[in-house]
Image (cartoon, rainbow, N blue to C red):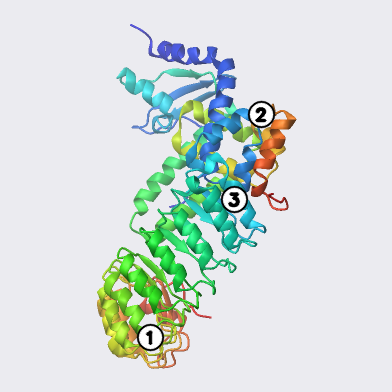
Amino acid sequence: MKNYAEMAETRLALSEMEAAEAEVVWNRKTVPKVLKIVSTRLLQRDLVSLLLVSPWLYRSLVSYPSIWLSLDFSEMGNAGNRVVAALSLPRYCYVKHIKLEFAQDIEDKHLELLKIKCLDSLQNLECLNLNGCQKISDKGIEAITNACPTLKVFSIYWNVRITDMGIKHLVKNCKYVTELNLSGCKNISDKSLQLVAENYSKLELLNLTRCTKLTDHGLQQILLKCSFLQSLNLYALSGFTDLAYKSISLLTQLKFLDLCGAQNLSDEGLACVAKCVNLVCLNLTWCIRVTDLGVICIAQGCTSLEFLSLFGIVGVTDKCLEALSRSCSNTITTLDVNGCIGIKRRSRDELLHLFPHLKCFKVHS
Amino acid sequence: MADDGVNTKVEAVSKATTETIELRTEDGGVFDVDKPVAMEFLILKSFYEDEGRVFDKTSIRLPNVKQLELSKVIEYCTRALEFGAKSAAAAGDKDAERMVRQEREGFEAEFVDELSNEMLKELILAVNFLDIKEMLDFLIRSVANRIRNRSVAYVRQFFDIENDFTPQEEDQIHQENAWAFEGVDAD
């Protein structure tokens, strides 16, 4: 009967014989394998540096498309030229994410150049971040959206040059957008919202922070047609009224809602928001017309609430906290009641008593 | 529950239900390893399962593994199993879960801090040979942290790789990828 240990030894001895060869094989097979996994945790700069280590490592690494799906030029100078140079390299032909957040020296002409020179490499792009790229105008948007038909996530915050025309190009060229961030794009009007509503019925995230030209009319279009919205940001938009707010109840999937500065929002409007039963985050900072009535509706309707700010609302009292505690004490981890002078018992301990899982007591500064 | 320190020199555990395997390293080390820990080494696990044999106490020689590495591997795997059990016990209790997580993170940070570059590589070699997925993933994360922001020369030295680029090749790749580096202009 063969000895167990002998069999084990034979098996392992065999591998010992190959040990010398294995070392080289290990190096050339395993090091790239190791680095492929390591690469998911490396910064872009370090990843590219690996290509300079040795020729066989270079060849191995460029043969893995999965590690070359992202390009990040955040805050880099001369970014326009950099992105063209990068996209001219074959290994980025399947790129999915391009981040140019606060990159400098990126202009319309670079986006036009990308369309001319790198069109093939842009056919899989899903996510384009042009946040803070203030030199880009409608022209650049026209070019890049034309080059990227599969775009799903488009973000261009703090750009005051983009107008409804730019959005027109976006909806014409990119049919699959699910996330749109236009925070700070002050020149966007209701016309853009109409275009978005008509074309992006599957939209999941929309950020309209500080787009002060917008009115109820535009917002209503969105609320009526983008029924799958999960995140809606209306921060610092004081022009809307209950007329539009009431239709927020149509957004049954809504999880995140920022109404900071909604000075016209009444309890009636808030009662409609309360119909969004899946709400997790609700920002009511400076919603100065709101009273206990509205907040109690929220308490009763939104039982999964984790994040709530009532900052600056003087019309709410301890009553609304009690109601919230009855239904959301298990879930609330952030509650800002600073400036809520109508609430008498709002020391840290008193709040913890009502909401035992509370971690954060301040949202608004 | 107070956490007992785990000795790196593993002793046979005298629990009625815990069996051990004797593992011998190429440099003469002998270790009595609890079966659950040893079964984390897929090279051993598949061996036993392939044979369809009943487990019995035998001594196995591991030719590609040295004492120091094996003791580290056993230390990590033993603690990993403990953390796994603690995590399961804490399930549902957010505070308890967090405590276990933090404890584990503390252990892992200390574990990797004590490793030299050489040791880290040797461990990867050993763990790769023994086929221990979780530990390999942990080590790889640690490597990523080590080579973060380092020069190409450092990385070569770290992996013991010779630079057999010709100067022209190296130059070309440099130029093609200049865009990725700040302070270097892309044309």
> Residue at the spot x=45%, y=38% of the render?
B134
Tell me the distance, in whole angstroms, between the alpha carbons under discs 1 and 3.
42 Å
Q: Do discs 1 and 3 share a chain?
A: yes
Q: Which mark is residue A273?
A: none
* Chain of residue at mark 2: B
Asked if the residue under mark 3 is in contact with the one under mark 1, i.e. CB atoms within 8 Å, the reply is no
Q: Is residue A282 visible?
A: no
Name the foreground residue: B176 vs B86: B176
Q: Secondary structure at mark 2?
A: loop
Q: Amino acid at mark 3?
A: Val
Q: Secondary structure at mark 1?
A: loop
Tell me the distance, in whole angstroms, between the alpha carbons under discs 2 and 1.
63 Å
Name the foreground residue: A60 vs B26: A60
Q: Amino acid at mark 1?
A: Phe
Name the foreground residue: B93 vs A74: A74
Is B183 on the left-hand or right-hand side of A60? right
Residue A76 position by quadrant:
bottom right
Give the residue at the far top of this rendering: A1
Q: Which residue is mark 2?
A: B161
Residue A131, position as x, y percentages in the image: 54, 65
Name the foreground residue: B169 vs A335: B169
Q: Which residue is mark 3?
A: A84
> Residue at the spot x=36%, y=58% of the render?
A176
Q: Which mark is residue A240?
A: 1
